Amino acid sequence: MLRGLTTVSYWAADLTEATRWYTELLGTEPYFQRPVEGPPGYVEFRLGDYQHELGLIDSRYAPPGSAGGPAGTVVYWHVDDVTATLERLLSMGATPHEPAQDRGEGFITASVVDPFGNVLGIMYNPHYLDILKSTRPA
């Protein structure tokens, strides 16, 4: 039924600034924008080992009743160093949401609220690395 993560979408009232912030954080430009001409309503980045999609959407397109700030769901992105990544996010203007937590057996999580009100989770996840290793040629 659920076959895999395809796109994580974040809302931003200032999409131009959000695009700039995520471009700096990710070290890459978005690969997709709509509309193509004029101010964007949606931009998308591909990132990571599996080229997952991170979409930024102008908050004026949010469905009625959407949360206006941090809500109950956290999507965690695998990182190799939670502490260093957390420090970088905070230095870029994100605010703490959940401090680094050792969850046992090598799992470490943390989360921040980006400058646009979205929760961004980071995690060191040994299972992610095991799956990645199993999909790569020896």
Image (tube, rainbow, N blue to C red):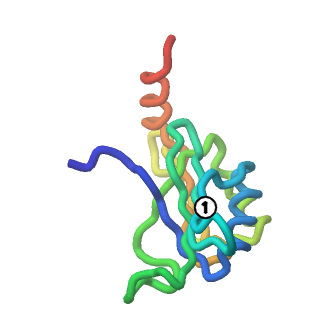
In percent of the image, x 41 and y 74: which residue is there? Answer: 72
Q: Nearer the viewer, residue 116 or 102?
A: 116
The residue most toward the front is: 37
Q: Position of residue 48 (x, y in %)?
A: 58, 42
Can residue 95 be seen here? no
Q: Is residue 6 left or right of residue 85?
A: left
Q: Position of residue 132 (x, y in %)?
A: 48, 29
Identity, as a three-letter code, of the amino acid under mark 1: Gln
Q: Which residue is mark 1?
A: 33
Q: Is residue 98 above or below residue 117?
A: above
Element type at marker 1? strand
Q: Position of residue 122 (x, y in %)?
A: 56, 54
The residue most toward the top is: 138
Can residue 71 be seen here? yes
Q: Is residue 84 left or right of residue 109?
A: right
In percent of the image, x 45 and y 40: which residue is there? Answer: 105
Q: Is residue 35 above or below residue 62?
A: above
Determine which quarter of the picture holds residue 135: top left
Determine which quarter of the picture holds residue 115: bottom right
The residue most toward the right is: 91
Q: Nearer the viewer, residue 134 or 21?
A: 21
Q: Is residue 32 above or below residue 138?
A: below
The residue most toward the left is: 1
Q: Position of residue 43 (x, y in %)?
A: 60, 63
In percent of the image, x 46 and y 37: which residue is there? Answer: 128
